[in-house]
């Protein structure tokens, strides 16, 4: 049996990291214990707060799930979102407006603002101070969606939604740096809802039951399964819808954690796809733009089309004039999530939580 030297090196390195994983896991366990026993306090707000997060480091699909909630609630409530604003070039609390860029608030919040301009989109590293700042600016807010806040225990969300990737479920993973978990598997018990994301659309019921058994939810916890659904491409410059053609040659520009599902989807739709892969949340440099331009020139005879994700589009927009001068079509491929089953039950859980929280607040005010 021939062993790959690289695989041997990686295996040895992971074993060397295991003691650090135990130490980090112990620190996170102690931190959670201090919150659970009340030694560390959590702030609870009168406005309904829904947290969407994960145990692992990125790539579980939080953004389209937040957008699902935004679509669900947008016509009934005044909804606001708050994110950390990962890799933004600013600090502290910031509320997005019409002139805001991804540099100021980060790519995912910028995506929210572009798709839902009527909603209040804010960023702040500390949600405990960020939420009061948001409510001071937007006192009419009726629901707050917290993005990637599962570990922010200084704020007590009324509804905790935990997302885990079908291909990398938390119950098979380990704490950093040996694995990818930010805290131990038992932290999943804090969730009210657990969503297994990025599933095959035709995931059999037997496998869903087996995964649910591995999750081993508490009696009050509900488990759901979602899959990615790709929307219609739209032109980066005009916003007009455009259609993929079988004979097309695509240059996929991606700065997301896992572009493989989108790459697979495009390869089923067009003649050929060339992937230009960059780190997650990457801000494109002049050198990157030159690489993209040169790739287009190499494929000039095939009249290539650049396709990117919505998240990447918010960062490419910082170079909009440069891209437009190339004369190469740039399209954006949006994604949404859909429930394999139980959509109505999930919606009901969310809506009932909001109604119950608001009624409790009004009842308390009447008795004050």
Image (cartoon, rainbow, N blue to C red):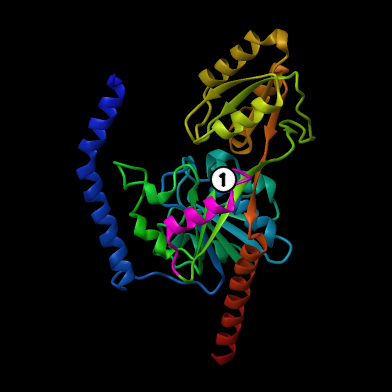
Which residue of the protein is positioned furthest toward the bottom in this rendering? 367
Pick the front one: 59 or 148: 59
Any magenta on residue 276?
no
Pick the front one: 212 or 277: 212
Q: Is residue 199 above or below residue 343?
A: above
Q: Quadrant of the N terminus?
A: top left
Res 247 visible: yes
Pick the front one: 199 or 361: 199
Any magenta on residue 208?
yes
Q: Is residue 228 above or below residue 341?
A: above
Magenta stretch in the rendered image: 198-218
Res 119 visible: no
Circle 1 — which element? loop
Which residue carries the number 1 mark?
199
Q: Residue at x 56, y 44 (%)?
A: 198
Q: Residue at x 56, y 29 (%)?
A: 254
């Amino acid at each position: 049996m021939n062993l790959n030297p690289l695989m041997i090196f990686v295996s040895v390195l992971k074993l060397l990291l295991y003691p650090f994983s135990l130490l980090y896991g112990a620190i996170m366990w102690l931190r959670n214990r201090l919150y659970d026993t009340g030694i560390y306090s959590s702030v609870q707000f009168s406005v309904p707060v829904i947290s969407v997060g994960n145990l692992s480091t990125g790539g579980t699909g939080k953004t389209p799930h937040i957008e699902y909630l935004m679509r669900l609630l947008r016509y009934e409530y005044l909804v606001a979102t708050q994110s950390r604003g990962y890799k933004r070039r600013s600090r502290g609390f910031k509320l997005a407006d019409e002139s805001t860029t991804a540099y100021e608030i980060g790519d995912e919040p910028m995506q929210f603002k572009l798709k839902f301009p009527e909603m209040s989109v804010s960023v702040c590293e500390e949600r405990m101070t960020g939420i009061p700042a948001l409510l001071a600016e937007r006192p009419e807010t009726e629901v707050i969606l917290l993005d990637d806040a599962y570990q922010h225990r200084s704020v007590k969300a009324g509804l905790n939604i935990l997302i885990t990737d079908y291909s990398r479920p938390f119950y098979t993973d380990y704490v950093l740096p040996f694995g990818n978990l930010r805290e131990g598997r038992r932290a999943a018990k804090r969730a009210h809802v657990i969503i297994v994301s990025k599933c095959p659309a035709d995931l059999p019921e037997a496998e869903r039951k087996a995964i649910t058994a591995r999750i081993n939810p508490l009696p009050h916890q509900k488990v759901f399964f979602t899959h990615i659904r790709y929307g219609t491409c739209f032109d980066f410059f005009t916003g007009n819808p455009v259609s993929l053609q079988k004979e097309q040659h695509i240059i996929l520009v991606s700065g997301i954690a896992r572009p493989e599902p989108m790459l697979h989807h495009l390869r089923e739709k067009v003649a050929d796809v060339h992937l230009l892969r960059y780190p997650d949340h990457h801000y494109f440099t002049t050198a990157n733009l030159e690489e993209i331009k040169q790739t287009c020139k190499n494929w000039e005879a095939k009249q290539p089309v650049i396709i990117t994700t919505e998240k990447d589009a918010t960062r490419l927009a910082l170079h909009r004039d440069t891209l437009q001068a190339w004369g190469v079509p740039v399209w954006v491929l949006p994604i949404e999530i859909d429930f394999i089953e139980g959509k109505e039950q999930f919606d009901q859980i969310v809506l009932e939580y909001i109604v119950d929280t608001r009624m409790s607040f009004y009842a308390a005010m009447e008795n004050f």
